[in-house]
């Protein structure tokens, strides 16, 4: 099939089959997304960051843990593009490797948190009554804890490391998503279209999963992208307190925390991982914004 | 003439090109009751709003002539328009719930509207507000003045809205589907009330509705709009003798209580109406 | 003797302190239409919602085809009874295509051959196949209401509950939808319960009309008697007069407007 006929097949107003309609929708979504230049910037940046982290050994000249104490806190140069840190390790290498840890943690947290929050929130909102009260009191308990303290306690009870840090952060971030999804569900559940679906005889689980959650998704996506930087910073805080990534493992937050004393003399040492955090959270934000537009068919 | 409109055009820029919502509408209005009838998308509301320059900012308005009591609406400066809108012309919308401030009592809102135009003390304004509520036949004006919009029924809310619009003694009243959200019994009362006020105060009235029998029952003249154009103008009393097939079609497709039909006539839309 | 399709006896519905429906009774024979008219707050929609199973907080007795109905209903009930809502803008899921909306009842009830059922349903409500993969916001009000009717018919119900099915539509579209409903009833021998504030619409579709006021059904009247003005309750007479006054001003003599 040539390009033009493929395009025509995708963009037809009268698809002949569900498969064609679904591909057409995806393609239209992509076209819409592509029109949003900022979102494209976000998407490309996220891809570059993820691919770069995965290919870290191939694109970095040093070992991230190799120390060279005679060359501490060196300024950027041809040998060390971003300079070196307080133990003489190559900063560029550590930032690239740090992406693995930091992005991995962020993605793991989101993958854990968003579905749990969505599910708890929409179940509570849809069923109401006793279920709602019980689930919401549980969320209140988690919301009432200071985030870092709960995470600390949790990590201390297990063993320090990124896995525990991920669970700790996830444990303290899902209540916000549950609240959000519940508020959305409460407005959706009284609409006529949900009444119509109830009248088909569908069981509540089906209604929640197939009809309510898709409508809660867009606000959750926005919230997730806004939370990304917060998650990175919490991870950094845990790392700084010795409860997150363990040295010498490179992690953006920990890298800033460990070198914050040098901000005035060797400013690039803490600044460069900071810029990495900034770029990553900005890219996720832009991407999330574009995704939300595409998810809403009224925008097309 | 209070309002003169000649060849009014309203269009919107859309991704698919210009969309012409009103395409060359002309009308004049004195101290009389004009009904504009049409289905959704006919451009009836846009036409009326253009007179008060209350169109969304995306709308592009053009006309050979568009005046309110000699003021050129197209070129008038915003302060002039604000005076026209607030003082000399009132707009009544379908749902009073959206037009009234939900956190202010009814009496307070009417008094504010009155004070903006007449000045005077708060006590005087409160008195005037109670007076106005009485004029729109609210039986217990003092009590109703102390209520918040959500505490009113649909009919009461619409009366309060009308009272507020009457506060500055306007010369023109535009009512956009004022009774579509109301019950038949209340609808009749509200329309009688508007009718009475309009004739007593010598105002001009533009009544916009989708309900042809209702409008003709109540107005002096009727203008039937379709796809941004006026298809037919006729004195309200001549409705039964309407000529245009669209007007006839609108009348014929109504189920009737008095003259039952097994099958309702449906409207066959002639593409020629778009250009006629 | 076959039992009536719908039997409602002394139905009461409370919302907190207020009684929205206070003891309503009526029966609808199989294949017949029953109309309920009343003003907003008269409880007419509440009756329909209790009957449909959407509101389980009622007392009294209701039965369908001789079987008593409880507060909650099972799948079998929803196969036999379906509802069409007033606002076609609000009754279709905004993120689901027509195809998805129509296939949902088939999936829930495990009815196979989705493809041909959907095409047949679209044809039955006179919609072109091209709307199948559209979203609700891409359709006109009349098209949406046709989709809503098609969805209600997917599982081949015997009873259709119609809650102001045309009051959000333009009059020309209203006529088309009313004709469609009349056609469908003839073809499928459906039983209708139609709620509306519009006397003419109710009388057009239903031979018997119940008039509600303040949660009570104050009168049940044949539409012939209603047309002829043989009313017994003053509220019925009032509603009729208002309706006739607009239709035919000369009919009502001595009424000042």
Image (cartoon, rainbow, N blue to C red):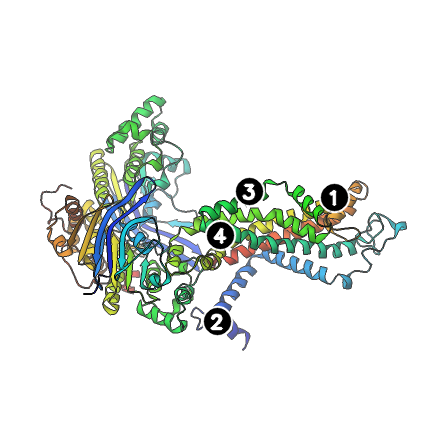
Q: Kindly indicate whether the residue at mark 2 contacts the one at mark 3 (C-beta within 8 angstroms).
A: no
Spatial separation of the CA atoms under disc 4 and disc 2? 33 Å
> Which residue is depicted at the point 29% across and 48% down?
C59
- The kind of secondary structure element at disc 3 is helix
Residue A1 vs residue C175, the one in the foreground: C175
Q: State which tag comes first along the sequence, 4 or 1.
A: 4
Give the letter of the chain under mark 4: A
Q: Nearer the viewer, mark 4 or mark 2?
A: 4
Q: Residue B215 got which mark?
A: none
Name the residue tied to disc 4: A123
- The kind of secondary structure element at disc 1 is loop
The quarter of the displayed image where residue B34 is located:
top left
Q: State which tag comes first along the sequence, 3 or 2.
A: 2
Dot 4 crowding, Cα within 10 Å, few <14, some 14–19, many 20+: many
Dot 1 crowding, Cα within 10 Å, few <14, some 14–19, many 20+: few
Q: Residue A241 got which mark?
A: 1
Would you place residue B30 above or below residue C157 in this image?
A: above
Name the residue tied to disc 3: A140
Q: Nearer the viewer, mark 1 or mark 2?
A: 1
Q: Residue A20 got which mark?
A: 2
Same chain, marks 1 and 2?
yes
Image quarter (top left, top right, bottom left or bottom right) of the C terminus of chain C: top left
Residue A194 vs residue B144, the one in the foreground: A194
- The kind of secondary structure element at disc 4 is helix
Same chain, marks 4 and 2?
yes
Q: Nearer the viewer, mark 4 or mark 1?
A: 4
Give the letter of the chain under mark 2: A
Same chain, marks 1 and 3?
yes
Horizontal side of A94 relative to C190 (left or right) equals right
């Amino acid at each position: 099939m040539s390009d033009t006929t493929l395009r025509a097949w995708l963009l037809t107003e009268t698809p002949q089959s569900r498969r064609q309609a679904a591909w057409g929708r995806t393609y239209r979504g992509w076209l819409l997304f592509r029109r949003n230049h900022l979102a494209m910037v976000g998407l490309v940046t996220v891809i570059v960051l993820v691919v770069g982290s995965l290919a870290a050994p191939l694109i970095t000249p040093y070992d991230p843990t190799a120390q060279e104490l005679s060359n501490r806190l060196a300024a950027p140069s041809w040998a060390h593009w971003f300079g070196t840190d307080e133990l003489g390790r190559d900063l560029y290498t550590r930032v690239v490797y740090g992406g693995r840890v930091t992005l991995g943690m962020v993605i793991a947290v989101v993958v854990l948190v968003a579905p749990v929050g969505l599910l708890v929130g929409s179940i509570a909102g849809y069923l109401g009554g006793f279920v709602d009260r019980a689930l919401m009191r549980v969320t209140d308990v988690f919301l009432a804890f200071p985030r870092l303290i709960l995470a600390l306690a949790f990590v201390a009870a297990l063993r320090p490391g990124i896995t525990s840090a991920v669970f700790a952060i996830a444990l303290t971030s899902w209540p916000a998503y549950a609240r959000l999804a519940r508020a959305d569900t409460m407005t959706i559940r009284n609409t006529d279209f949900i009444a119509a679906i109830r009248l088909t005889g569908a069981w509540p689980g089906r209604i929640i999963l197939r009809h309510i959650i898709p409508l809660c998704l867009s606000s959750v996506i926005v919230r997730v992208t806004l939370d990304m930087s917060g998650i990175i910073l919490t991870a950094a805080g845990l790392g700084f307190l010795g409860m997150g990534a363990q040295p010498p493992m490179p992690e953006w937050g920990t890298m800033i925390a460990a070198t914050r004393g040098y901000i005035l003399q060797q400013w690039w040492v803490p600044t460069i991982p900071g810029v990495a955090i900034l770029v990553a959270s900005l890219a996720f934000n832009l991407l999330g914004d574009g995704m939300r537009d595409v998810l809403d068919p009224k925008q097309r | 003439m209070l309002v003169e409109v000649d060849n009014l055009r309203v269009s919107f820029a859309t991704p698919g090109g210009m969309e012409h919502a009103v395409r060359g509408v002309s009308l004049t209005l004195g101290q009389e009751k004009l009904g504009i009838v049409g289905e959704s998308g006919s451009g009836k509301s846009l036409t009326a709003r253009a007179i008060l320059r209350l169109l969304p900012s995306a709308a592009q308005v053009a006309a050979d002539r568009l005046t309110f009591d000699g003021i050129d609406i197209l070129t008038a400066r915003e302060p002039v328009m604000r005076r026209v809108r607030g003082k000399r012309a009132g707009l009544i919308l379908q749902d009073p719930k959206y037009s009234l401030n939900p956190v202010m009592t009814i009496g307070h809102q009417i008094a504010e509207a009155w004070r903006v135009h007449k000045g005077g003390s708060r006590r005087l304004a409160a008195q005037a507000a109670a007076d106005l509520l009485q004029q729109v036949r609210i039986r217990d004006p003092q009590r109703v003045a102390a209520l918040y919009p959500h505490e009113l029924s649909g009919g009461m809310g619409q009366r309060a809205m009308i009272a507020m619009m009457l506060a500055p003694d306007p010369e023109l009243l535009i009512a956009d589907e004022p009774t579509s959200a109301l019950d038949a019994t209340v609808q009749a009362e509200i329309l009688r009330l508007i009718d009475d006020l309009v004739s007593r105060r010598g105002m001009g009235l533009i009544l916009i509705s989708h309900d042809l029998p209702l409008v003709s029952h109540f107005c002096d003249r009727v203008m039937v709009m379709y796809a941004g154009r006026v298809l037919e103008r006729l004195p309200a009393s001549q409705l039964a003798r309407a000529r245009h097939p669209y007007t006839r079609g609108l009348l014929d497709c109504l189920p009737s209580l008095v003259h039952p039909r097994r099958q309702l006539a449906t409207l066959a839309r002639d593409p020629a109406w778009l250009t006629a | 003797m076959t039992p009536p399709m719908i039997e409602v006896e002394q139905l009461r519905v409370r919302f907190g302190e207020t009684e929205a429906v206070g003891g309503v009774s009526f029966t609808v024979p199989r294949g017949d239409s029953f109309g309920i008219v009343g003003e907003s707050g008269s409880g007419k929609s509440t009756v329909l919602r209790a009957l449909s199973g959407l509101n389980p907080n009622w007392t009294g007795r209701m039965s369908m085809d001789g079987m008593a109905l409880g507060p909650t209903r099972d799948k079998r009930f929803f196969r036999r009874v379906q509802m069409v809502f007033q606002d076609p803008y609000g009754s279709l899921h905004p993120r689901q295509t027509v195809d998805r909306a129509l296939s949902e009842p088939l999936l829930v009830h495990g009815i196979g051959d989705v493809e041909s059922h959907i095409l047949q349903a679209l044809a039955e409500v006179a919609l072109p196949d091209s709307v199948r993969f559209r979203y609700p916001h891409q359709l006109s009000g009349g098209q949406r209401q046709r989709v809503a009717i098609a969805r209600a018919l997917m599982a081949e119900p015997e009873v259709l509950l119609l809650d102001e099915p045309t009051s959000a539509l333009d009059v020309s579209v209203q006529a088309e939808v009313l004709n469609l409903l009349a056609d469908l009833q003839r073809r499928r021998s459906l039983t209708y319960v139609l709620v509306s504030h519009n006397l003419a619409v109710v009388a057009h579709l239903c031979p018997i009309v119940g008039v509600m006021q303040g949660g009570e059904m104050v009168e049940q009247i044949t539409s012939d008697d209603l047309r002829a003005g043989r009313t017994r309750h003053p509220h019925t007479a009032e509603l009729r007069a208002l309706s006739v006054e607009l239709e035919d001003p000369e009919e009502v003599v001595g009424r000042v407007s």
